[in-house]
Image (cartoon, rainbow, N blue to C red):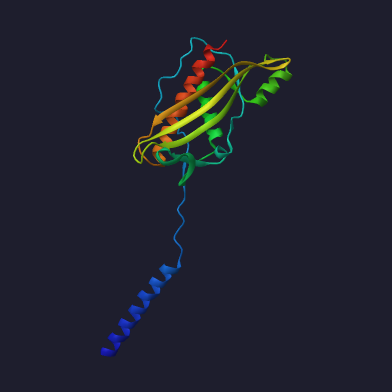
Amino acid sequence: MKAARILFASLAALAIWALAACSAIAPDKPVRAMLYDFGPGTTGASAPVVPTAAQAPLVLADIESTAALESTALLYRLAYSNAYELHPYSQARWSAPPPQLVRQRLRQMLGRDRAVLDPTDAAVLARVGGTMPRVLRIDLEEFSHVFDSPTQSFGVVRLRVTLTDNTPAGEKLVGQREFSRREAAPAADAAGGVRAITAATDGIAQDIAAWIAQVR
């Protein structure tokens, strides 16, 4: 009986050792990065512009940006230590590059009071002899989560907008303006940065809509 107990204890110890060894050898399961976009609707911005009548159609060109914004990285700056350095969040990414997300949101917002066309749609319109609408071109210059301190941060979006008329001689400048928004982040993390950047983008979209309605 004593020998059986010793054998059982030895086997149990061997099993525990084997499990520990397997745990030490097996790699950790990789953590999948969270994917973010702007959500289904507007957040954190003032009431949208309500036109008195339907406004003229507009061509929205593809948005240009710096090389840093051509990837899906969710970027932040530590302004309190080095405002000139961009850092990517390791476990958070955008669902698409920022220029695509901004263009999608602008199209959604501007489309409330006018038809918003792609450049290919405008080309088809020209071939059938239709009136060519104005063209909106955008350069995205800043799109990041900025920390003024370890606990205080903001979503910052800055872009340059150019509005042109389509003429037989080519595009003619109607107006150009820089828009910038800085919205407080509700939390000092990636999710908080996303909410702040979304609010800043929505605010800029409304500013652009109001500006286009005023430009003659």
Farthest-out residue, front: 81
Give coordinates of residue 104: x percent, y percent.
Answer: 54, 30
**Residue 42 can be seen, yes or no:** no
Q: Residue at x 52, y 30 (%)?
A: 102
Relative to 147, does residue 137 appear above or below in the rendering? above
**Residue 185 can be seen, yes or no:** yes
Which residue is at the front of the view, 115 or 157?
Answer: 157
Quarter of the image holding residue 43?
top left
Give coordinates of residue 6: x percent, y percent.
Answer: 29, 86
Which residue is at the front of the view, 61 or 156?
Answer: 156
Which residue is at the front of the view, 41 or 1?
Answer: 41
Is 125 left or right of 94, judged from the image as shown? right
Is 85 left or right of 171, judged from the image as shown? left
Which residue is at the front of the view, 170 or 125?
Answer: 170
Quarter of the image holding residue 151?
top left
Which quadrant holds the C terminus? top right
Give coordinates of residue 142: x percent, y percent.
Answer: 51, 32
Give coordinates of residue 145: x percent, y percent.
Answer: 44, 37
Is 199 left or right of 124, judged from the image as shown? left
Which quadrant holds the N terminus? bottom left
Is 138 left or right of 186, judged from the image as shown? right
Relative to 171, does residue 35 appear above or below in the rendering? below
Q: Residue at x 47, y 56 (%)?
A: 30
